[in-house]
Amino acid sequence: TSSPEFLHASTAAPMCASAAARRALLAVAAAAAVGALSLEAPVPPLWPETWSAAFFTNISKGNQDRSDRWIAGRSWYSAELRVQRVWHAALAHQCQHFYKTNGPCSLYFTTEGLFAHLEREQTCCLDLPAIHAPPRDWLSGAEYMGVEQVAPDVTAQSAVLGALADGVSCERYTKTHSYWVLPRASCHQGDGAVPCKFNFPPSPEMDWYFNRSSWVANARIDESVLNLPAACASKTPCSGGDASAVDGGRLVIV
C-alpha cells in the first residue's frame, strides 16, 4: 500500500408595565435563562456517514530521549461498510510499540476485528478480534468539558504543522478518551463537527492533532482504500494480540 497523500434578542419592559405583564416578562426571562444553560452542554457530535482526515502525532511527548518530532497519519471511516482505517507513517509510536516495525502501518477496524498491515514487511495480522469500527454515536454519553484551547507542544517543524501550531478553541468531550471538535453553529448531532484533537491517556506520544483543513465528510471513499490487503486473508494472529491484556488506549481509535 502506498503512502496516502495529505491532503440574541432582548425585550425591554415598558416603564408602566402592569404587575401581570412584569410577571409574564420574568417568566420569559427565566425560560430564556434555562435555554441558555442548556446550550452550555451541547449534544455530543455524531460522526458523518463517511469522513477522512489527516493528523499528526508528537512522538517526543512522553519520551525524554527523543527530540521534538511529528509523525503524519490519516484516517478514513465508512459507517455503511463498518470499517475504519488508520494509517501511520514510518516511526509512529503505534507501529513501533505494538507491531515492532519502523515502517508505516495501517490499522483496519472491521466487522472481523482489528487488523494490522505492515507496509515495509508486506505482512498482516489479526490483532484484536473483539475490537471493531466505532459506531457513529460512539460519543453518546460523553461529558461536555467546555471550550478549551488546543495547541500542540511545538518546538520544531511549525512550518509543516501550519495552522496546528497556532492553537484553536475547541469543544471538549470526555469518555475515557477526550475528543476536541471545532465549536458548532448548532447543537445538532449531524452537523459533522470538525475534529481538533483526540487523546490516548496516559500516552501523549499517541495523541492526534488533526489537520482541520483536510477534513472531508459525507463524500464517497474509494473502497480500495478501506478494503483489507490480500495479506490479511489468512487472519494470522498478531503476536501478543490478547484483548484481555490490551491497554485502554487501543480500545477506541478515531
Image: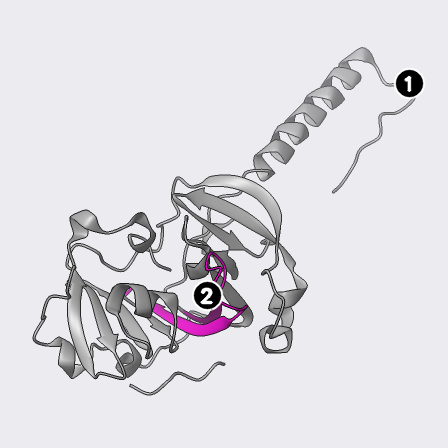
- Asked if the stretch drawn in magenta spans residue 77, the answer is yes
Where residue 179 appears, as percent x and y from the top left, is 47, 52
- Residue at far bottom of view: 2
Q: What span is in magenta? A: 52-81
Observer-nearest of 85 and 243? 243
Observer-nearest of 92 and 194? 92
- What is the quadrant of the N terminus in the image? bottom left
Three-letter residue code for mark 1: Cys
Let me know if residue 87 appears in the view. Answer: yes
* Callout in the foreground (1, 2): 2
Three-letter residue code for mark 2: Ile
Residue 16, numbered label: 1
Residue 105, numbered label: none
**Left of 184 or right of it: where is 20?**
right
Where residue 198 appears, as percent x and y from the top left, is 46, 56
Residue 59, numbered label: 2
